[in-house]
Image (spheres, rainbow, N blue to C red):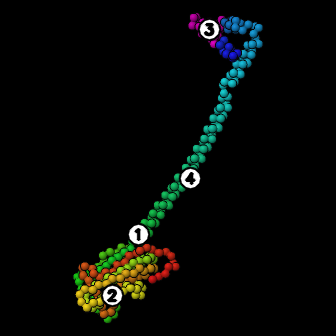
Amino acid sequence: MKALVCILLLLETFVFVVQQQVDGGLNEKEISQQISSEDGRQNPPQTDTLRAEASTDSQQYCDLGIPDIHAALRELTATVTEQKANIRALETQLRDEMNKKNEEISNLTLGQVELRKENRDREIAFSAGLRESGDGYIGPFTDEITLTYRNVITNIGNAYNPITGVFTAPLKGAYMFRISVFSHGPTASAASIYKNGERVVIAYALQPQRELNASNGVVLILEVGDVVYVRLWPNTRIFDNNNNHSTFSGYLLFPLREDNLCKM
């Protein structure tokens, strides 16, 4: 309450000074006299103690009402510093995560390149008919002969040689091979699939007249450089024309890398 009285007195004095300046102005001496007069009127000599108490209360009021600016600034500075540290830590975390993602993308790209290369290695397939043109029989002969399938229909990977009739494995893997034989009775028709000089399977057909045909197939485990081909049995014959009745085909099922697999 005392502080309020003090403030009101100061406001009254300020209003009076301003009014005097508007009316014609006061010099410094008159202003001092006016302040002294107002002070004497509002605060007689016997109230000096009361005025001192009012001043003390006013100071306490100011101390209670106005915060410590320096303390607030220090607190704000500490907060800003903490936030900067948090931002730096976040930036470091984001940078590490981005580097990790970039590394994963790079590894993925390398993996895709390797996968494409591996897929290209797996692109091995061929199919060929016996006669390049015309029609007719091959055989019979007194000994086995290797058949050369010259009418190449498909030869992806160029592993089959139409000049020799031999397929050479370009990589280790499981391969599927099939043959078909066609002819007319009464002479039998028979051919065998060979792997590295060893007979594996045979396709055989025999009847006294009209058409006869047979087919067979096998899955072989081949090492790089292994060869597969077809041989005509002795005293048999095989027929073909542009309809490709008699064919030799093969393709890679999947590559193998293990060294302890059993071979066919």
Q: Residues within 10 Å of mark 3 (few under 14, many from 20)?
A: some
Q: Residues within 10 Å of mark 2 (few under 14, many from 20)?
A: many
Q: Residue at x 43, y 77 (%)?
A: 174
Element on which disc 3 rests:
helix
Q: Residue at x 45, y 74 (%)?
A: 255
Mark 2 vs 1, N-terminal side: 1
Say which residue label 2 marks. 204
Q: Does 100 appear above or below 142?
A: above
- Residue range (magenta): 11-32
Say which residue label 1 marks. 120
Residue 112 horizontal side relative to residue 1, left or right: left
Question: Distance from label 2 to label 3 (Cα)?
Answer: 134 Å
Which residue is more in the foreground, 78 or 211? 211
Q: Residue at x 60, y 10 (%)?
A: 18
Say which residue label 4 marks. 96
The kind of residue on which mark 3 rests is: Phe
Whether residue 18 appears in magenta in the rendering, the answer is yes
Q: How far across and down, in percent of the image, does residue 223 sit?
A: 45, 79
Proximity of marks 2 and 4: CB atoms separated by less than 8 Å: no
Question: Distance from label 4 to label 3 (Cα)?
Answer: 71 Å
Q: How far across and down, in percent of the image, does residue 60 sit?
A: 71, 22
Q: How far across and down, in percent of the image, does residue 208 sit?
A: 25, 91
Question: Distance from label 1 to label 4 (Cα)?
Answer: 36 Å
Mark 1 vs 4, N-terminal side: 4
Say which residue label 3 marks. 16
Mark 2 vs 4, N-terminal side: 4
Element on which disc 4 rests:
helix
